[in-house]
Image: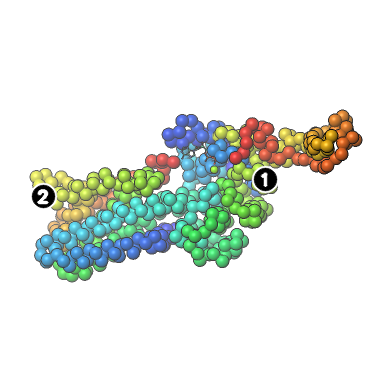
């Protein structure tokens, strides 16, 4: 569906390349996530892929053709949501959808239904200027999917949303995947990536540090551990042990046998831990 | 059809941002000024200048305001990832502002100059001049990221276009300026009020058309990202 080879991009006036030779493939029906700290180049990749930033090196093959050579028909088939809501501020929510809907050959889906899905139906005739950031993000999101695209690009789709609304957006994304749509998304939120993505790419300073499914990454880099809290000479202590060969661990046995145990939890390495471990960087 | 959609969209946008209210106010002001001017040749010239400067300035300033608003709201980036083509995007702007110019020119002329106006020439002049100035203003705004940048850049562009108009004052070799679109536009508009030969009319229309074609190509190139500052 989308094959990218040795993609490089340099902003006009910038010192070096912002994207430094990126390779990845996205398969049909997959949710593929780009993860990385802010400034790593996630937004830049998305803008290059959708053709908003021109003049890349390398190859972007999408729908079986080179990106540079695809005409405007491309935009009938893709849906794009930017990281900040870019809406007509003086127009109403409904007008914002209707005016854009004119530009597609396929008549957009039932607009009221979409508005209702993200809780904006009661506000459909209100001017967007007075909307909260979260409301704008939701409107921005449904505008990108109203024409029923097959490939979608979402830049930080849940940023600025409260947990309830973030869940609504995540559910819509998962539903679209179940309908066979392909989704590219970027985020700096590991939990989102774990919940949604079939595969993730860790992006650091314009390069992919690692790319695999969250499950495989955890298997490979994560170590399952148990965390034991206990009392030792009246003071609280905490120790962590790997699950493998736990039975033979002397210190663990000592604690279990002789100390007063407060709690025992088994822990899974999170994607976030893996990111830090592999890249040596925090996600911000 | 996408172009119709874009025109509807632009009409709505311009209306909601108060462009039409501002324009109604300016038109009324022009009409009041015209009524204070005594009749005769002076009035013909004054009428021509007002009717000319009207679409010119309207195209130039309004397109700047529209583009900067679209940039600030980010919609210009969103439109770039819809099937709407750069040609359709620009054409819709030319059509809406051109229509507004023609309406204003007709209202001003009808209320002040009922007789003796060559309407065909007047409409041709207004339409072609409006296209030129809208595209010219488009180029000024295209490379700007902030309103301040736009205001700074606008001034030299504005002077560049106003100064040659003094060529209407006939000095030696002033005819050289006739190949400029703004001078051709002024002369054509004046001609609509005081009379003009068909050869001259044809010449000016060709001059403006050639300029319009050229500046349209440049505007398209810039809009497609040729002068990309991102
Ligand atoms: N218009 C621009 N011109 C020059 N450099 C830019 C521009 N936009 C972003 N950058 C730089 O490119 C890098 C990647 O930015 P971005 O793609 O926005 O990262 P992310 O989305 O991961 O936060 C940053 O170092 C940023 O400073
Ligand atoms: Mg970003």
Q: Position of residue A154 (x, y in %)?
A: 57, 48
Report the number of numbered marks.
2
Q: Quadrant of residue B143?
A: top left
- Image position of A227 (left or right of A134): right
- Image point (66%, 36%), residue name: A275
Chain to which mark 2 belongs: B
Q: Which residue is mark 2?
A: B170
- Image point (51%, 52%), residue name: A85
* Residue B79 appears in view: no
Question: Which type of secondary structure does the marked residue at label 1 adopt?
Answer: helix
Chain to which mark 1 belongs: A
Q: Quadrant of residue B122?
A: bottom left
Question: Which type of secondary structure does the marked residue at label 2 adopt?
Answer: loop
Q: Which residue is mark 1?
A: A191
- Image point (60%, 44%), residue name: A187
The quadrant of the picture occupied by the C terminus of chain A is top right
Q: Position of residue A65 (x, y in %)?
A: 54, 42
Q: Position of residue B114 (x, y in %)?
A: 18, 70
Q: Are marks 1 and 2 in contact (CB under 8 Å)?
A: no
**Closer to us: B224 or A112:** A112
* Residue B152 appears in view: yes
Q: Position of residue A157 (x, y in %)?
A: 59, 50
The quadrant of the picture occupied by the N terminus of chain A is top right
Label 1 – label 2 distance at C-alpha = 75 Å
Q: Quadrant of residue B42?
A: bottom left
Classify mark 1: residues with Cα within 10 Å, few (<14), some (14-19) or many (20+).
few
- Image point (46%, 57%), residue name: A88
């Amino acid at each position: 569906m989308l094959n990218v080879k040795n993609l490089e991009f340099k902003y006009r006036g910038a010192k070096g390349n912002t994207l430094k030779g990126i390779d990845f493939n996205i398969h049909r029906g997959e949710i593929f996530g780009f993860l990385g700290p802010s400034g790593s180049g996630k937004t830049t990749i998305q803008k290059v892929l959708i053709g908003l930033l021109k003049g890349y090196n390398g190859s972007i093959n999408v729908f079986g053709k080179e990106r540079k050579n695809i005409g405007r028909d491309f935009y009938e088939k893709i849906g794009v949501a930017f990281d900040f809501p870019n809406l007509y501020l003086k127009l109403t929510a409904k007008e914002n959808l209707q005016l854009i809907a004119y530009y597609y050959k396929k008549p957009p889906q039932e607009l009221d239904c979409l508005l209702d899905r993200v809780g904006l139906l009661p506000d459909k005739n209100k001017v967007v200027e007075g909307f909260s950031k979260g409301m704008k993000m939701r409107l921005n999101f449904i505008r990108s999917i109203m024409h029923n695209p097959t490939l979608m690009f979402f830049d930080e789709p849940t940023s600025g949303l409260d947990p309830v609304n973030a869940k609504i957006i995540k559910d819509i994304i998962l539903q679209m995947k179940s309908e066979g749509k392909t989704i590219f998304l970027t985020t700096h939120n590991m939990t989102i990536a774990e919940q949604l993505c079939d595969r993730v790419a860790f992006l650091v300073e314009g390069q992919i540090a690692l790319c695999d499914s969250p499950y495989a990454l955890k298997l490979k880099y994560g170590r399952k551990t148990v965390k034991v809290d206990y009392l030792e000479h009246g003071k609280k202590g905490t120790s962590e042990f790997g699950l493998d060969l736990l039975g033979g661990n002397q210190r663990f046995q000592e604690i279990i046998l002789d100390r007063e145990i407060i709690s025992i939890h088994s822990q899974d390495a999170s994607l976030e831990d893996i990111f830090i471990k592999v890249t040596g960087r925090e996600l911000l | 059809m996408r172009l119709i959609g874009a025109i509807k969209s632009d009409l709505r946008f311009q209306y909601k941002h108060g462009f039409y209210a501002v324009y109604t106010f300016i038109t009324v002001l022009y009409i009041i000024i015209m009524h204070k001017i005594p009749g005769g040749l002076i009035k013909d010239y004054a009428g021509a200048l007002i009717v000319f400067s009207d679409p010119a300035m309207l195209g130039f300033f309004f397109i700047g305001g529209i583009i900067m608003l679209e940039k600030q709201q980010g919609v210009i980036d969103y439109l770039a990832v819809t099937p709407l083509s750069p040609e359709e995007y620009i054409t819709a702007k030319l059509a809406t502002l051109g229509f507004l110019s023609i309406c204003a020119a007709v209202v001003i002329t009808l209320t002040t100059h009922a007789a003796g106006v060559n309407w065909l020439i007047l409409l041709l002049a207004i339409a072609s001049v409006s296209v030129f100035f809208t595209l010219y203003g488009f180029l000024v705004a295209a490379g700007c990221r902030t309103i301040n940048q736009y205001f700074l850049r606008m001034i030299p562009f504005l002077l560049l276009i106003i100064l040659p108009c003094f060529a209407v004052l006939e000095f030696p070799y002033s005819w050289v300026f006739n190949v400029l679109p703004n001078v051709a536009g002024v002369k054509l508009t004046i001609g609509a009020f005081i009379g003009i030969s068909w050869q001259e009319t044809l010449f000016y229309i060709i001059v403006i058309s050639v300029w319009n074609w050229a500046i349209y190509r440049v505007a398209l190139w810039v809009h497609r990202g040729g002068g990309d500052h991102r």
